[in-house]
Image (spheres, rainbow, N blue to C red):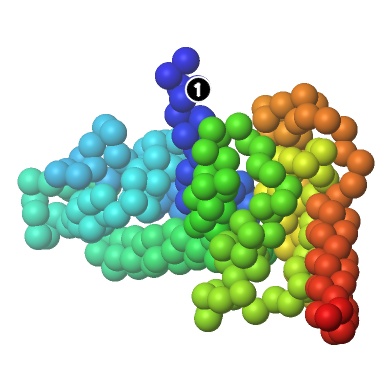
Amino acid sequence: FRIGRLLRLVRQARGLRRLLATFVLSLPSLLNIMSLLLLLLFVYAVLGVKLFRDVAFGNYIDRHANFQTLPVATMTLFRCVTGESWNGIMHDCMVQESTDPNSCSYEAGNCGYRFLAPLFFISFTLIGSFVVLNLLIAVILQNFTGSSDQQPADLVSDEAIEHLLRVWAHFDPEASGNAKSEDLVLMLSAVPEPLGFVDEETNKVKMSRAQQLHVLQEAKVPDHQGFVNFQELLQGLTQREYARQAALASRPTEYAPSSKMLARMIRARKACNIEALPSPVFSQAELYAARLMQQQFRQLHALRRARLPVNG
């Protein structure tokens, strides 16, 4: 159960999800590099058994690290790849009777190679540690930057959604998830783009009424007999922004909602119990257009009445 909580935390942590996605993307390349490392270990292990099989035990060459058998030689070289005591093993493989008579004997044939041992271990360390392992890091970094380039940035940030929530709370103090449709334009006039009408640079509403009506048309937010639902409003405005960016992008498929996102949207709609609201007949754009027409008609009627001569 507690492990399930950790997995739930991974789903919520965006940075951790990105690291896991990078690891998954790197798996094919990592397998290729690991195959190259195994091949390198096998070649040098065979060569090490051929050269240092009879070398006497010393300070670093012992029953756990030696070249007497191929499996142990492979594990010894794998330890050398990590950088652990590779130089000490190299010095044990260089031992000579002339410099240390108590360590080996030419008659017993358990002395090392003064010149071949440095060439063997230095070349292996350069190729294994400084090339192959760094190549692993380079592949992971490349996929990490590549995954961020392939995924478009969030067009609707968490800050924008929180701003919309704060403004919504003023029009829905009981937190019912529904607000009056007549307050929608006033509400969006206090929310910055892309979820509202306020320009982020000037912090003022620059959109004309025709542009505001166009935003509502693209959002396709329904009206439930005088009420608007928060989830329908948020999802409509978000989908409108993604569709707008997809029309401008060179690869529109990047901005298409995934099946996982669609499933989350459906669950959010069910959680707010939209089915309990009256069935929509008109959209918010149609209601706003009707209100604009009524307003223009009232203004024109008032202007005509003002021009009429006063009976005296």
In this orientation, which residue lies closer to the viewer: 233 or 76? Answer: 233
Q: Is residue 173 visible?
A: yes
Residue drawn 67% across and 27% down?
Answer: 271
| Residue at the spot 34% in from the left edge and 66% down from the top edge | 122
The foreground one among 14 and 215 is 215
Residue that badge 1 annotates: 4
- In the rendered view, does 56 fall on the left or right side of 77? left
Instruction: Please provide percent x and percent y for residue 169.
Output: 52, 44
Report crowding for label 1: few under 14, some 14 to 19, many 20 or more residues within 10 A (C-alpha): few
Can residue 108 be seen here? The reply is no
As shown in the figure, which amino acid type bears the numbered disc 1?
Answer: Gly
Q: Is residue 268 left or right of residue 202?
A: right
User: In the image, what residue occupies the spot 90% across and 47% down?
Assistant: 282
In depth, the one of 163 and 50 nearer the eye is 163
Q: Is residue 312 above or below residue 56?
A: below
Q: Position of residue 281 (x, y in %)?
A: 91, 41
Q: Is residue 59 above or below residue 204?
A: above
Residue with the most extreme top position: 1
In what quadrant of the picture does the C terminus appear? bottom right
